[in-house]
Amino acid sequence: MKHVIIYTMPTCQYCGVAKQFLAERGIDFIEYDLSKDYKKMTEIVSRTGRASVPVIEIDGEFIVGFDKQRLAKKLGM
């Protein structure tokens, strides 16, 4: 089972799309709302070099933005 974390913000349209993509495929994930956690936000920006969401972390590897093909490949679909 893959360990999946999604970093979101409430104003992000693609965050909802990414969460729906994961949920429809039965992928369990942990969600962090970066608008409520400044420390986590600065950590993610530092680790990815990007200040955009969604950021999806799968087994320690980051995917910035909603990239359906890359997500499916990383999830083994």
Image (cartoon, rainbow, N blue to C red):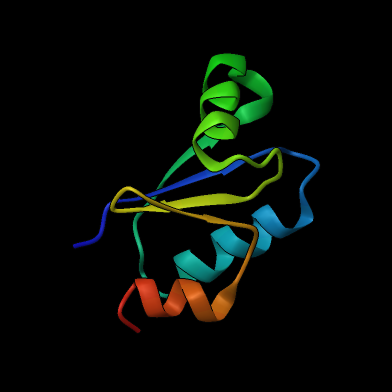
| Outermost residue toward the left in this view | 1
Quarter-wise, where is residue 27 in the image?
bottom left
Q: Residue drawn 67% across and 56% down?
A: 16
Q: Position of residue 38 (x, y in %)?
A: 62, 16
Viewer-side residue, 64 vs 4: 64
Q: Position of residue 35 (x, y in %)?
A: 69, 25
Q: Is residue 48 left or right of residue 73?
A: right
For the C terminus, the quadrant is bottom left
Q: Residue drawn 71% across and 44% down?
A: 52
Q: Is residue 15 left or right of residue 7?
A: right
Quarter-wise, where is residue 73 in the image?
bottom left
| Outermost residue toward the top in this view | 39
Q: Residue drawn 70% across and 38% down?
A: 51
23, above or below 16, in the image? below
For the N terminus, the quadrant is bottom left
Total number of numbered labels? 0
72, above or below 23, in the image? below
69, above or below 59, in the image? below
Q: Is residue 6 left or right of residue 28?
A: right
13, above or below 11, in the image? below
Viewer-side residue, 73 vs 37: 73
Q: Position of residue 43 (x, y in %)?
A: 51, 25
Q: Where is residue 47 in the image (x, y as percent from the top left)?
A: 49, 35
Q: Residue drawn 28% across and 53% down?
A: 59
